[in-house]
Amino acid sequence: MRYTQKDVCRAFDIKRDTLRHYEKLGIIEPEIDQGNGYRYYDDWQINLLWDAKRYHAMGFSLSEVRSILHGDSLADVQARVNGRVDRLREEQAYLERRIAMLSSYCELLNSVEEHLGKYVIGKTPAVRFVPRREMHELMLGDGFTESGAFANANHALSIPCAYFPSIDNELYYWGFAMLGEWYDHMGGPEEGSVSLPSGTVLSTCVDAGERWGFGRHLFDGLVAEAKRLGKKPRGMLCGYLITRTYDKDGRYHRYVEAMLPLEE
């Protein structure tokens, strides 16, 4: 059979420009009438189109499709498909991490009102923190640039975070926190990041309010409550920014989950 360009576009539900793009890439080679420029497609070209759409749907680029249809050996095709399966599994694992992160974030959002001003002792996992600012100043240098680029590329797996290296002064760092096992598995850089260990924490939800309202004072209630309970703090204060909102009166709020690590 001999098919016109209109026939093929209708049968495959594709646009003329798409068909011409396939031709330009060398995936198909229609017969061209030198008199009027009309293109005609035989059954072999139709088969190539079917195969091209199948491989393209598997996630191969059109240049890869062209190689598969016109140059690859059986071993080449096997290697390409096996590699595609591996990439899809990696994408699936990444998506599962995103779902886990969103689920955790939903739990944080749902607990804000109940947790506001109340104190809870619980467990926190090990996280890796990538600082971008010291107080209000951007962190510069190769180490912070590399770790910052990693954080930017994986925002879906992280949450804004601040930590105070000491509970005795005002110095703090802003950045992004990710589960340590995820960070390590995905090859996040060592330099420019800080490990926040797992363990027992005393936590509460606080409202940092207007801009520039963040500071060491937001954690004073935690330190006082730890003393009241006879618990000894260990290490760094840490706070996760849950969300920024406005209420019906137009007042600005920043809800932070504040945590104080405790000795076991």
Image (cartoon, helix red, strand yellow):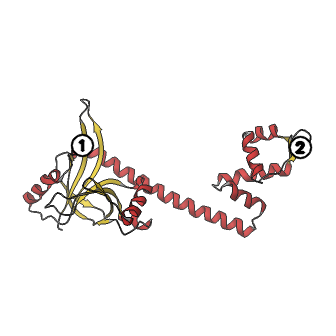
Residue 199 position within the rendered picture, expressed as x and y whole percent measured from the top left: 24, 65
Label number found at residue 106? none
Residue 60 position within the rendered picture, expressed as x and y whole percent measured from the top left: 65, 56
Q: On the picture, is 36 further left or further right than 19? A: right
Q: At label 1, which amino acid type do we have?
A: Arg
| Quadrant that contains the C terminus | bottom left
Q: How many marks?
A: 2
Label whose residue precedes the other's in the sequence (1 or 2): 2
Crowding at mark 2 (Cα within 10 Å: few <14, some 14-19, many 20+)? few
- Residues under labels 1 and 2: Cα distance? 70 Å
Local secondary structure at mark 1: loop
Q: On the picture, is 191 further left or further right than 48? A: left
Local secondary structure at mark 2: strand
Residue at 40 percent across and 67 percent down: it is 189
Quarter residue 263 falls in: bottom left
Q: Is residue 16 above or below residue 167?
A: above
Label number found at residue 211? 1
Q: Nearer the viewer, residue 237 or 82?
A: 237
Where is mark 2, residue-wise? 2
Residue 213 position within the rendered picture, expressed as x and y whole percent measured from the top left: 20, 45
Q: At label 2, which amino acid type do we have?
A: Arg
Crowding at mark 1 (Cα within 10 Å: few <14, some 14-19, many 20+)? few
Residue at 36 percent across and 69 percent down: it is 191
The nearer-to-camera label among 1 and 2 is 1
| Quadrant that contains the N terminus | top right
Residue 238 position within the rendered picture, expressed as x and y whole percent measured from the top left: 23, 58
